[in-house]
Image: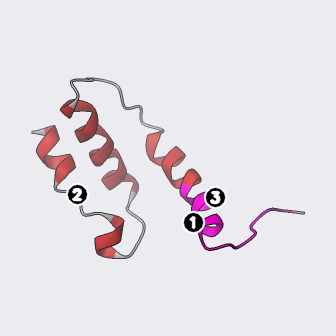
Amino acid sequence: MEITKGINVPLASETLELPSTEDILDRARGMAYEYQLSHAVGPNVPELVLAGLEVKIPAFFGVDNRII
């Protein structure tokens, strides 16, 4: 059930927007269950993923987002 729910979450490349925290959590749990890692995804995973995206996306486009 969890694997199917995680697989059915649309990708950001399909929706052209960042996923919600619930979608990130569903996808992470689906991947964890797929590899038989029960209870491997903590509740703070979406926050960490979104924080990483805030750094990676501007860097990908060459935008300097550091605070001086």
Estimate the x, y position of residue 51 in percent, counting from the top left. 58, 52
Residues in magenta, as a range: 53-67
Residue occupied by mark 2: 9
Give residue 28's quadrant in the image.
top left
Secondary structure under the numbered disc 3 in the rendered image: helix
User: Of marks 2 and 1, which one's residue comes earlier in the chain?
Assistant: 2
Q: Identify the amino acid type marked 2.
A: Val
Q: Please say if the residues under marks 3 and 1 sit with CB atoms less than 8 Å apart.
A: yes
- Residue 16: image x %, image y %? 37, 76
Q: CA–CA distance between discs 2 and 3?
A: 23 Å
- State whether residue 55 is above or below residue 1: below
Which residue carries the number 3 mark?
55
- Bin the neighbour count of mark 2 within 10 Å (Cα to Cα): few under 14, some 14-19, many 20 and up: some
Q: Secondary structure at mark 2?
A: loop
Quadrant holding the N terminus: top left
Q: Earlier in the sequence, mark 2 or mark 3?
A: 2
Furthest residue to the right? 68
| Disc 2 versus disc 3: nearer the observer | 3
As measured in the structure, the alpha-carbon distance from the residue carrying label 3 to the one carrying label 1 is 6 Å
Which quadrant is home to the C terminus? Answer: bottom right
Q: Please identify the quarter of the rendering in which residue 14 is found.
A: bottom left
- Does 59 sit above or below residue 30? below
- Residue 57 disc label: 1
At label 3, which amino acid type do we have? Val
Q: What amino acid type should be assigned to the residue bearing mark 1?
A: Ile
Tags 2 and 1 touching, CB below 8 Å? no
Point out residue 2 in the picture as x, y percentages from the top left corner.
16, 39
- On residue 4, which mark appears? none
